Image (spheres, rainbow, N blue to C red):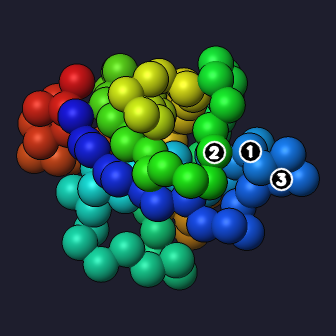
Amino acid sequence: MFKETIRPRFNETDGLGHINNNVYTIWFDLCRLPALKLFEERLEPKNMPFVLAHTSTDFLKEVFYSDEVIVHTRLKKIGNSSMHFVHNLYQNGKLCTIGKAVMIHFNHKTKESMPIPSNIRIELEKHI
């Protein structure tokens, strides 16, 4: 499991003082980076060997600007070329949001998925 602490910024709030629903996707993307860096330490956009195939977010409780959030990210499943992530977001010790994402190991030149290398799979399996 990977753990990230995020301090919400004022510009991430909506008119009611809640974190805007679109922000969670950005936060969860950030929280997947430690797993993705197992493939390539210096992730550069032009060489990013992944595509995002699916995301979903369940909003359980409101999240506010005032207090930091903790995101626990784990791999739920590792396929031949896919990684299924689950993000649990907590504020003040309460589970507020659950996010899910599927990323595909992808070759942008051939436009085809690529198998996850066995040495990286071993490292990824430590986070299931």
Secondary structure found at label 3 = loop
Does residue 80 appear to the left or right of 1 in the view shown?
right
Kindly indicate whether the residue at mark 1 contacts the one at mark 2 (C-beta within 8 angstroms). Answer: yes
Residue that label 2 marks: 64
The amino acid at mark 2 is Phe
**Label drawn at residue 18:** 1
The residue labelled by disc 3 is: 14
Looking at the image, residue 67 sits to the left or right of residue 24; the answer is left
- Where, by quadrant of the figure, is residue 44 drawn? bottom left
In x, y percent, where is residue 3?
A: 27, 44
Q: Position of residue 117 (x, y in %)?
A: 21, 46
* Circle 1 Cα neighbour tier, 10 Å, few/some/many (<14 / 14–19 / ≥20): some
Closer to the camera in the image, 35 or 91: 91
Which label belongs to residue 39? none
Q: Is residue 103 above or below residue 37?
A: above
Q: Does the residue at mark 1 contact the one at mark 3 (Cβ under 8 Å)?
A: yes
On the image, which quarter does residue 77 sit in?
top left
Residue at 89% x, 53% y is 15
User: Does the rendering let one see residue 12?
Assistant: yes
At a point 37% along the width and 74% down the height, the residue shown is: 43
Amino acid type, residue under disc 1 in the picture:
His
Inter-mark Cα distance, 2 to 1: 5 Å
